[in-house]
Image (cartoon, rainbow, N blue to C red):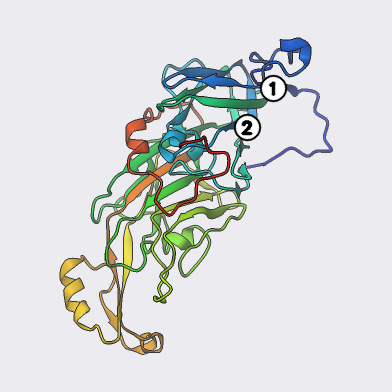
């Protein structure tokens, strides 16, 4: 995937356009008509429950950049602002997702994050650079499905241009399992018909409390084109899929990262860092494309780690009875002794997972409409969290 054009190439076949409240149709010579061109309509207040058509464009063309912002609010209100995209006159959306998840941030929380395809600058300005080609038309809708009005600004930058035969339409589906089912891998995406390409995902984890010291031993798996019980692509662990190792703290990189780690303050009397309450990570398969011809399914396992310190050997029997062990069972002795551990095991666990999956497909297809009630459940701000800058009074 080419992220941007050769800037030295001047292609006059590209008809450059832009839509905002200052030019809602993107028409030539029609920008800034309000207030005589002196910034008369930069934004709109969108009421609770209101739907707004951000762009309705006749093709062929390509959306190249979307920017938007709205005032910070509690997580439930932020995640209730949703984006739907329809291609070529279809009545069902091919993108239906919370806005923040589309830009790389689950759980309704704004943090600074810059990736190869998105940027949430200063935790305030939402930018996406996903190529979004369309053959006949594209309609982009925003719905404020929350209970409070928002002050909304946006801009959609696009070009009118030919639609190539090998082009794919961007699809974004949203799934959440709250909680997951023991020993059943969470499905990130499935059901898309090829030819297609799995671009990647934005995943949110609400880590549920238990005795495990680590929640992320599960593997990413990708099944394609006839794979049965076993996948073609199999990773080695959650943090490994995100590109880091030995646990996962807040970080970002062009193709993968975990910008959102919400955890309680560390206990100064414990050498063990606290498990987070919320984790948000992204993974873009740009340099390592995953292509399928007919069908696909992407999943993530829910497996954690148990560590028994020396002097607490009784926990092996207690935890062995409480948890379903995974892998090869308990490991004792050897290198563990140097780490003051008696035993280590991985075990099946249950957490709350959500995923926005980004898939290009040769033909436009329908995705499930976002279930807003399910998306906003159980994501309230913790007592130890600081309110973000710009939050509305009393929020």
Percent coordinates x, y for residue 230 in the rendering: 33, 55
Question: Is 16 rendered above or below residue 378?
Answer: above
Splitting the image into 4 quarters, where does residue 49 fall? top left
Q: Which residue is mark 2?
A: 67
SS at mark 2 in the image: strand
Which residue: 80% across, 28% down?
11
**Who comes first in sequence, dot 2 or dot 1?**
1
Alpha carbon distance from label 2 to label 1: 11 Å
In this view of the protein, which residue sits in the foreground, 184 or 10? 184
The residue shown at (45%, 52%) is 385
Q: Residues within 10 Å of mark 2 (few under 14, many from 20)?
A: some
State left or right for residue 142 relative to residue 57.
left
Residue 265 pos. (x, y %): 44, 63
In this view, 343 is above or below 51: below
Q: Quadrant of the C terminus?
A: top left
Provide the residue designation for mark 1: 18
Identify the residue at image location x=77%, y=17%: 38
**Disc 1 packing (10 Å; few <14; some 14–19; many ≥20):** many
Comparing marks 2 and 1, which lies closer to the viewer?
2
Q: Quadrant of the N terminus?
A: top right
Contact, mark 2 vs mark 1 (Cβ under 8 Å): no
């Amino acid at each position: 995937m080419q992220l941007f054009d050769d800037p030295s190439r001047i292609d006059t076949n590209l008809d450059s356009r832009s839509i905002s409240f200052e030019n809602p149709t993107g028409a030539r010579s029609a920008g800034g008509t309000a207030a005589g061109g002196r910034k008369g309509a930069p934004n709109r207040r969108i009421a609770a429950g209101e739907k707004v058509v951000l762009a309705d464009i006749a093709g062929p063309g390509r959306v190249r950049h979307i920017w938007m912002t709205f005032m910070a609010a509690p997580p439930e209100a932020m995640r209730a602002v949703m984006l739907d995209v329809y291609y070529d006159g279809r009545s069902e959306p091919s993108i239906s997702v919370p806005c923040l998840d589309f830009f790389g941030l689950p759980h309704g929380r704004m943090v600074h994050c810059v990736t190869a395809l998105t940027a949430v600058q200063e935790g305030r300005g939402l930018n996406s650079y996903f190529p979004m080609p369309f053959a006949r038309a594209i309609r982009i809708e925003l719905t404020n499905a929350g209970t409070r009005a928002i002050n909304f600004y946006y801009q959609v930058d696009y070009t009118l241009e030919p639609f190539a035969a090998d082009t794919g339409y961007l699809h974004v589906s949203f799934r959440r399992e709250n909680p997951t089912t023991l020993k059943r891998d969470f499905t990130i995406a499935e059901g898309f018909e090829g030819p297609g390409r799995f671009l990647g995902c934005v995943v949110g984890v609400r880590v549920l409390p238990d005795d495990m010291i680590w929640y992320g031993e599960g593997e990413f798996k990708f099944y394609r084109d006839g794979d049965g019980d076993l996948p073609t692509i199999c990773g080695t662990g959650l943090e490994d899929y995100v590109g880091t190792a030995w646990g996962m703290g807040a970080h970002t990189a062009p193709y993968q990262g975990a910008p959102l780690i919400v955890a309680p303050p560390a206990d100064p009397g414990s050498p063990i860092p606290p498990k987070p309450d919320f984790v948000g990570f992204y993974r873009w398969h740009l340099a390592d494309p995953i292509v399928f011809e007919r069908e696909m399914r992407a999943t993530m396992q829910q497996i954690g780690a148990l560590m028994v310190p020396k002097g607490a050997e009784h926990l092996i029997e207690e935890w062995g009875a409480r948890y379903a062990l995974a892998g090869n069972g308990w490991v004792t002795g050897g290198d563990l002794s140097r780490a003051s551990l008696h035993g280590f095991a991985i075990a099946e666990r249950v957490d709350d997972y959500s995923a926005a999956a980004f898939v290009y497909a040769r033909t436009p297809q329908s995705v499930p409409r976002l279930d807003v009630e399910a998306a906003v459940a159980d994501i309230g701000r913790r007592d130890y969290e600081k309110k973000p800058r710009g939050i509305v009074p009393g929020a």
